[in-house]
Image: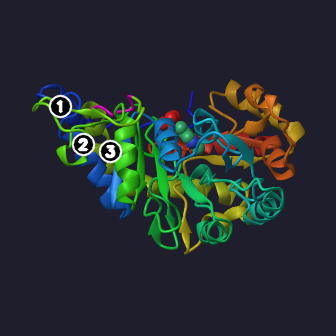
Amino acid sequence: MIPYGRQAISETDIEAVVSVLRSDFLTQGPAVPRFEQAVADYCGAECAVAVSSGTAALHIACLALGVGAGDWVWTSPISFVASANCALYCGAQVDFVDVEPETGNLCVAALERKLMAAQAEGTLPKVVIPVHFAGLPCDMQAIHALSQQYGFRIIEDACHALGARYQHEPIGLGRYSDITVFSFHPVKIITTGEGGMAMTNDATLAKTMRLLRSHGITREAEDFIYEPDGPWYYEQQLLGFHYRMTDIQAALGLSQMANLETWIHQRGELARGYFEALAPERLPHYFSAARRSAFHLYVHHVAPEQRAELFARLRAQGIGANVHYMPIYRQPWYQRWAQTPLPQAEHFYAGAITVPLFPTMSQAQQDTVLGALLASS
Ligand SMILES: *Cc1c(COP(=O)(O)O)cnc(C)c1O
């Protein structure tokens, strides 16, 4: 089976992990801060908080921004469920903004219309979570302008988009958002097995997220609320979680960072091959001077009535097709809230089929996939 995505692990990565296993600290040693610094340097962000998953990063990002009961959080329906669940964990309500038909990214015009309606009803969101779908940056400058006008905060769900660039700057820099979140699940751009990271330029938000990832506990004397009764003293100041990343994971992530630029380039070349053969009219959305996709996924679009047959045929030929994503509001859990289908999201989902794309994919493998896709059209 040619998988739709997979990790690349080198001997250097393995040695990095083994050296942690031989060291004094399997967790809470030096590797996590080193990995955080490496990602912060790459993105140009001030602060990085490594955690156990992208989902954990989204959760503590919402909490740090004060999301709670009575608040609304809006996100894209064309995403993994974690983009919306993070707000439900905080007791907030979730609503969805329709997407651009070309890219599956949050549609700025739809966001603006929805904001105007919400203002009239007094239901403006506290936080909007744009998702850089398949690695392509959303129109962050326009979303940021709306956040100034309507007073919401922004978390970028960049779980697909480590290595992407917007207006020539790395995603994660945070010029147009409060917090940016990455995932290091093995199908994502780099991996730590499981893992995630929240980037911010706000030291206060970073401090809160560090507390939240570790039970709400601090050992920093200058932060204590009470007088310490001995050198063993620590304080739990918030109801936090156990969301820490291990040093074993961080060592793998740090080692993986060395390949990031090469992998983005290889993903881009493979994606270009797909676009040129299958959908040349879509090339300008994905290859422009102003933004660079991380090309996490290649989503092919067919007529909705052809998708199931194509999916089955690809799988039968050993090609790991997948679908990203059924709109989140269609999930059974989300049915408890009245959900109006969003037309572009429905349309995007109906004919979407993800075909294999990962940096170590060979030209022969891509030719096999292209052969199978072109045979059907
Ligand atoms: C993978 C993913 C997440 C969750 O990341 P995990 O590390 O698996 O918890 C969140 N949002 C999007 C868009 C993702 O693709």
Give the secondary structure at mark 2: loop
Judged left or right of residue 273, residue 254 is: left
The label shown at residue 251 is none
Residue 5 seen in the figure: no
Give the secondary structure at mark 1: loop
Q: Amino acid at mark 2?
A: Phe
Residue annotated with mark 2: 224
What residue is rendered at 36% in x and 30% in y? Answer: 215
Q: Amino acid at mark 1?
A: Tyr
User: Do residues under tags 1 and 2 come within 8 Å of each other at their CB atoms?
Assistant: yes
Residue annotated with mark 1: 233
Confirm or reject: label 2 Cβ below 8 Å from ligand 1.
no
Could you tell me residue 260's position as x and y percent?
A: 38, 53
Residue 262 or residue 42, whichever sits in front: 42
Quadrant hosting residue 371: top right
Q: Amino acid at mark 3?
A: Gln
